[in-house]
Each structure stands twice: as C-alpha cells, then as structure tokens.
Amino acid sequence: MKTLILASSSPSRRAQLAQLKQPFTVQSPDIDETPKPHEAPEALAARLATQKAQKIAALNPDAIVIGSDQVGVCEGLFIEKPMTHERAISQWEHQSGQIAHFYTGVCVISDGEIQVSVVSTEVKFKTLSRETIIRYLEADTPYQCCAGIKIESLGISLVEYIRSDDPNAIIGLPLIEVVRMLASV
C-alpha cells in the first residue's frame, strides 16, 4: 500500500484524518495563500488545496497526498485567520449575527492523477456582545482558525446552525469527500 501524506500544518485536519484509522504522515506545504484579484472563494479553496497537494506530491511521487484549504466569506468579505486578539474581536464584531459561507477545498493526488472537490458550508452565527466575544476568544484562543472560531470546541456555542453535505468540512477536512476520493485511487 502507498504511503498516505496529509499536506497540512493544521492540527485539526490531522485529528480529522486520524478518525479514518489509516496510517499517514504529515508534511507542511508552506505556500502563498494570497487570493488572486477577483478570485471567487470556491476557486481559491480549490486552488490552495491543489497547490498544497502538488507541492508535497512533487517531493513524494509514490505517495497518495491529500491537500485541503478553507475559505470563508461573510457579508462579501473574506474571513481570515485573525492571528491576534484585536483582529479576532474586530472580525467577530463583523460576523456576529451574520450568515457566513465556508468553502473547503480538498485535493487528492495519486500517480499523477488529481482529484479536486469543494464542499460548501453555511453557518449562522449568533448575535454576540463584545463581552461574550472576548470571553470566547480568551477561552478557546482560535487565532489561527478561519473566522476565529473552533467549531469542534467551545466555538459551537456561538453558532445558530450549520448546513452542509459534509459536517466535517467546517472543521477543515471534508472526510466524506476524502473517503470517496481515496476509494478511487
């Protein structure tokens, strides 16, 4: 059996892939994630997932490589990883009470064959006070997570609903798609 490699530096994606009970290794694909001018969020998610997988596949041509990336949009603006407490507060004040759309791209490369898919997820955030936002950020420290939220943790308490064909996609790795793609390699 071929080596399975997750092209990611995300602990959440690593934990998700481990749920499949298949041995795998992880390699970080350090790529430029800057959107191209006028690039649609779905296209950006697919491109970044593909670039991550391609970078690691080039180094490991005999492996099966999985790349994934998530892009969020709220009220017409890209939702990023806030990285700092101050940016997270500002971001949460913008997305509080709003509906956000997340596009999770996944790419599987095996023997030079590339499979790419994007899973969309709609999330309705609760209307939150500044105090609630600050308490959440201090408790969960989601500064390196898209939208400044860890849905798989305390962040779920900030959500009114999540709609998706793959409930894993919102965490960062659409496992239903991954299983489908791996079945065909």
Image (cartoon, grey):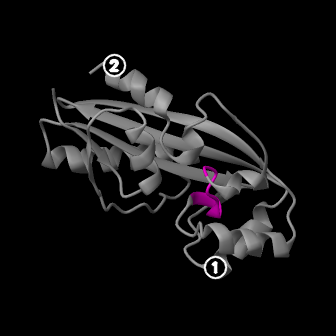
The kind of secondary structure element at disc 1 is helix
- The amino acid sitting under disc 1 is His
Q: Is residue 42 magenta?
A: no
Pinpoint residue 108: horizontal percent, then vertical percent: 32, 34
Q: Earlier in the sequence, mark 2 or mark 1?
A: 1
Question: Could you say which disc has been placed on residue 183 in the image?
Answer: 2
Pinpoint residue 59: horizontal percent, then vertical percent: 14, 49
Mark 1 sits on what residue? Answer: 85
Q: Is residue 22 above or below residue 86?
A: above
Whether residue 39 sits left or right of residue 61 in the image: it is right
- The amino acid sitting under disc 2 is Ala
Is the N terminus in the top left, top right, bottom left or bottom right quadrant?
top left
166 or 104, nearer to the observer: 166
42 or 184, nearer to the observer: 184
Pinpoint residue 149: horizontal percent, then vertical percent: 64, 59
Q: What residue span does the magenta drawing correspond to?
A: 146-152
